[in-house]
Amino acid sequence: MNRLSQLGVITLVLGAWQVAAASGQLGAVPTPLVVAGAVLGLVVDGSVWGPLAETLASWFISLLMAVLVGVVIGFPLGVSKVAYRMSVVTLDFLRTIPALVFVPLVVLLYGAGLQSTILLAFFGAVWAMVMQTIYGARDLDPVARDTFRSFGVRRWDTVTRLLLPTALPYMATGVRLSAAICLLISISAQIVMPAGGFGEQIVVHQLGGALPQMFAYIALCGVLGMAIDSMFRWLERSVLAWHPSHRKVSS
């Protein structure tokens, strides 16, 4: 029923867009049918694959960096109360800074290219991973922790059998949030600098007056974002099938 309601809302929105654009009420905005034709044209002539590869490269590399750095920083801060209290103000300050404010500095240092896009996306996404890892490490059950200590369980076993399973659901949420942030900032940075990918194609076609192609790339950005989010939700359900929040309850 939820799927049907979602499809119904999408159909209504597309129908309203078609009617409004066809009647001229949206100015130069093309109809959904025209945009769909432009998307098909980009796919057929192959011009979409190069920008797609550039966008995915920026997204994947920045996400990988954000996850690795977030886990390395987040675990020690989550385990140690002293370290967390000493760093919480700095973390709260840094994660409120929009990544795109560093565009002039990054372009000055590295130019308008893939490296700059990766750095901006990494800076924007790493804090979600850091904070989720901290929350996961701090959510450790004190009874279970004391039980492991009383039985003299080795530290490595404590980490792998208690700390990691406790923090893993939080980390999975952090990865999913970081994936969305990396994609958003990558495309935004490509628009602002510009630096290739879908973002630059949006700007190029907008300046050239090719509005159907511009909206086609905007639509492709949305489809790419939905595909990435769906993929990570599926992975999260698969990896955490043992966790109560994902375990299927039989009726």
Image (cartoon, helix red, strand yellow):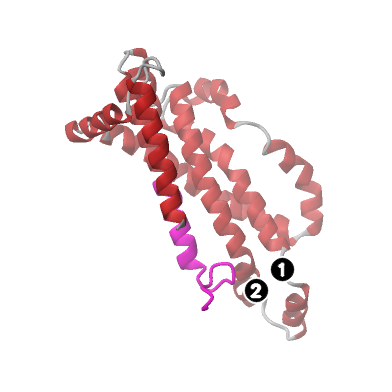
Q: Amino acid at mark 2?
A: Leu
Q: CA distance from mark 2 to mark 1?
A: 8 Å
* Pick the front one: 251 or 41: 251
Q: Which residue is mark 1?
A: 140
* Rendered location of residue 209, percent (x, y): 32, 13
Give me the residue at 67% from left, 79% from top.
154
Could you tell me which residue is drawn at 77 percent across and 46 percent down?
88
Q: Residue at x 38, y 41 (%)?
A: 11
Q: Which residues are magenta?
A: 226-251
* Quarter residue 187 falls in: top left
Which residue is identified by label 2?
A: 162
Against 175, is 195 above or below?
A: above
User: How many numbered discs sit on the rendered protein?
Assistant: 2
Where is residue 225 drawn, in percent x and y?
43, 42
Q: Are marks 2 and 1 in contact (CB under 8 Å)?
A: yes
Name which residue type carries label 1: Leu
Query: Element type at marker 1?
Result: loop
